[in-house]
Image: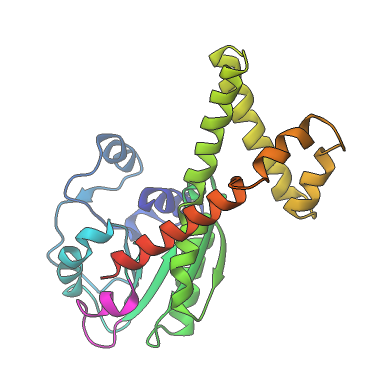
Amino acid sequence: MGYALLSGWLEGGLEPERILVQDPAPQPRIASELGAKGITAHAEVAALPEPPAVVLVAVKPQVMNHVLPQLARLLGPRSVVMSIAAGRRITGLAAHLPPGTAIVRAMPNTPASVGRGFTVAVGNAYATAGQREACDGLLRAVGDVTWVEDEGLMDAVTAVSGSGPAYVFHLAECLAEAGIAAGLAPQLAQQLARATVAGAGELLHRSHLDAAQLRGGVTSPGGTTAAALEVLMGQNGLADLMHNAVAAATRRSRELAK
């Protein structure tokens, strides 16, 4: 996710010399692509010529407590720390940073890698309007951004949009497997499932109609789609499964904050 954001910034015109990446063990592919863009991933950053304007912390929640104290000494009074780690609350981040540090907690999703991401963000009381605007501009380079005032919403945001792409990918997997079971060749089933999920998503993106209306437009009374929806919308169907899935992800997000 950090690399997806970085790619969006560079494509948007941010100069590589204004970017510093700290990663003790970058993936070989990412290290190579960073090098091609004129950026080196440093194992450790002991000091900087001047404090950074924005520090993006794009690490797993479980290692955040180890990473933040290293970054704290690099910050200045005008620096803002933006975290995209799932579950980690602002108060937990602030405990490892200098008092009064401006913090923004953001939850983007992986479609950011193709410029179609969606991010929800919330800032603490120390984040100024200018700092929020700077973070907004960086996040908006890879998709849409919405700000909320209630940080308590971020667990549900994580469960719906942060984790949501995985649900859609799994839907494509299941649709392909069902096609194979119905007699299609594996390659054709996968091609159909992939194209259908991608095409339906693009239609939903472009249409002014909501999802229920678009679903209704595909469904003829007594037809094949109606027969399938009787299963998907029946007892213990997709709605129940999705409710349980989002609830589980929300719980896990809250657990990561502990």
Tell me how many marks there are: 0
The residue positioned 49% from the left and 55% from the top of the image is 244
Residue 97 percent location from the top left of the image? 22, 78
Residue 36 percent location from the top left of the image? 33, 38
Taking the image as shown, residue 176 lies to the left or right of residue 8, namely right
**Is residue 66 shown to the viewer in this render?**
yes
Of 40 and 200, the residue lying toward us: 200
The residue positioned 76% from the left and 33% from the top of the image is 227
Residue 2 percent location from the top left of the image? 36, 53
The answer to whether residue 102 is magenta is no
Taking the image as shown, residue 187 lies to the left or right of residue 202, namely left
Residue 125 percent location from the top left of the image? 40, 88
The answer to whether residue 96 is magenta is yes
Of 185 and 197, the residue lying toward us: 185
Q: Residue furthest front?
A: 235
Taking the image as shown, residue 227 lies to the left or right of residue 124, namely right
- The relative height of residue 2 versus residue 87 in the rendered view (above or below) is above
The residue positioned 58% from the left and 11% from the top of the image is 185
- The relative height of residue 178 versus residue 67 in the rendered view (above or below) is above
The residue positioned 47% from the left and 44% from the top of the image is 166
Main SS category, magenta section: loop
| Part of the protein shown in magenta | 89-101
- Please state, as top left, top right, bottom left or bottom right, where the C terminus lies in the image: bottom left
Q: Residue furthest right?
A: 221
Q: State the scheme by which the image is colored.
A: rainbow
- The relative height of residue 68 versus residue 41 in the rendered view (above or below) is below
Of 254 and 147, the residue lying toward us: 254
**Is residue 86 shown to the viewer in this render?**
no
